[in-house]
Amino acid sequence: MRFPWQAPVRSASSRCERGANPWAGEVAVRLGGRAYPARLTLAALAELEGELGAESMVALVERFEGGRFSARDIGAVLVAGLRGGGWRGESAECLAGIEASPAEAAELAARLLARAFRIEGT
């Protein structure tokens, strides 16, 4: 129950949605006090497959759906998404500077994957 004087609770993911276009498959990721658009383009997906040695993108999505993902998976998805959105930093910079808890980072990565494979009308 919320009382009128209590501020609404906002997670990092809800703060990040400002500045991102979900209809374009984007999620905003906060680094160093700034929100950057992230999206999994075809090039970003190819980079992600190579980085994780995934046999297919379906296998990676199934890992997330089944809760069998690792911290490395989360980081790789976020870095690939940021690069797909135009960010040109280094992986270590992203992983050190992301403004989200591990659970929030996992949620952002899962949202990126879901938006990349969203089928119109669903």
Image: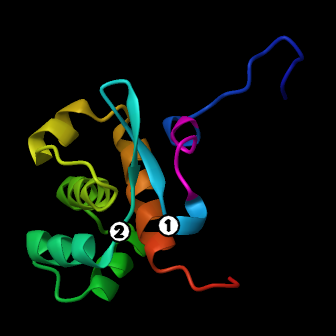
What is the distance, in whole Å, between disc 2 and disc 1 at their CAs? 7 Å
| Residue highlighted by disc 1 | 25
Amino acid bearing label 1 = Gly
Q: Residue at x 19, y 70 (%)?
A: 48
Residue 37, image x, y percentages: 41, 49
Quarter assignment of residue 46 = bottom left
Q: Give left or right: position of 22 versus 38.
A: right
The answer to the question of whether label 2 and label 1 lie on touching residues, with beta carbons closer than 8 A, is yes
Looking at the rendered structure, which numbered label has been put on residue 40? 2
Residue 109 in the image: state x and y as whole percent. 38, 58
Q: Which mark is residue 35?
A: none
Of residues 96 and 33, the one drawn nearer to the viewer in this rendering = 33
Q: Count residues near mark 1 (Cα–Cα under 10 Å), then give few for <14, some for 14-19, many for 20+.
A: many
Q: Amino acid at mark 2?
A: Leu
Location of residue 3 (image quadrant): top right
**Earlier-in-chain disc, 2 versus 1:** 1
| Residue occupying image coordinates x 23% and y 88% | 56
Q: Crowding at label 2, few (<14), some or many (≥20) Cα neighbours within 10 Å?
A: many
Highlighted range, magenta: 15-21
Secondary element type, mark 2: loop
Q: Residue at x 48, y 59 (%)?
A: 26
